[in-house]
Image: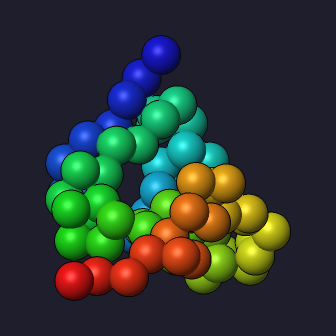
Amino acid sequence: MNIAVGNIRGADQINEIIKGGKADLCVMAKGHLFDPYFARHAARSLGYDGLKWPFQYGAANNFTPL
């Protein structure tokens, strides 16, 4: 398995790397630090809007900060 890391800037670049056979997996640490929902936003930008939110997010509906 080949993994690409470092200076990967977005969903289009990730797809180019994987489709081109340069890597089997791309790791985007800085992208996820900048945007914790990067994977969801990347999927939407590529035309996939079928991701469901994790079940645990429902628990925040009743949260009231002090």
- Give how far across and how far down residue 60 sits, in percent: 50, 70
Q: On the picture, is 52 further left or further right than 61? A: right
Q: Nearer the viewer, residue 16 or 52?
A: 52
Here the colouring is rainbow
Q: On the picture, is 48 further left or further right than 43? A: right
Q: Residue at 56% of width from left, 36% of height from top?
A: 21
- Give how far across and how far down residue 2 sits, in percent: 42, 23
Relative to residue 9, is residue 66 depicted above or below? below
Q: Nearer the viewer, residue 55 or 6?
A: 55
Q: On the picture, is 56 further left or further right than 33? A: right
Image quadrant assignment for residue 15: bottom right
- In the displayed orientation, state which residue is furthest to the front: 66
Image quadrant assignment for residue 52: bottom right
Q: Nearer the viewer, residue 62 or 28?
A: 62
Tell me if I can see residue 56 in this picture. yes
- In the displayed orientation, state which residue is furthest to the top: 1
Tell me if I can see residue 11 in this picture. no
- Give how far across and how far down residue 36 sits, in percent: 34, 65
Q: How many marks?
A: 0
Q: On the picture, is 45 further left or further right than 65? A: right
Q: Residue at 22% of width from left, 83% of height from top?
A: 66
Q: Residue at 41% of width from left, 43% of height from top?
A: 26
- Give how far across and how far down residue 35 sits, in percent: 31, 72
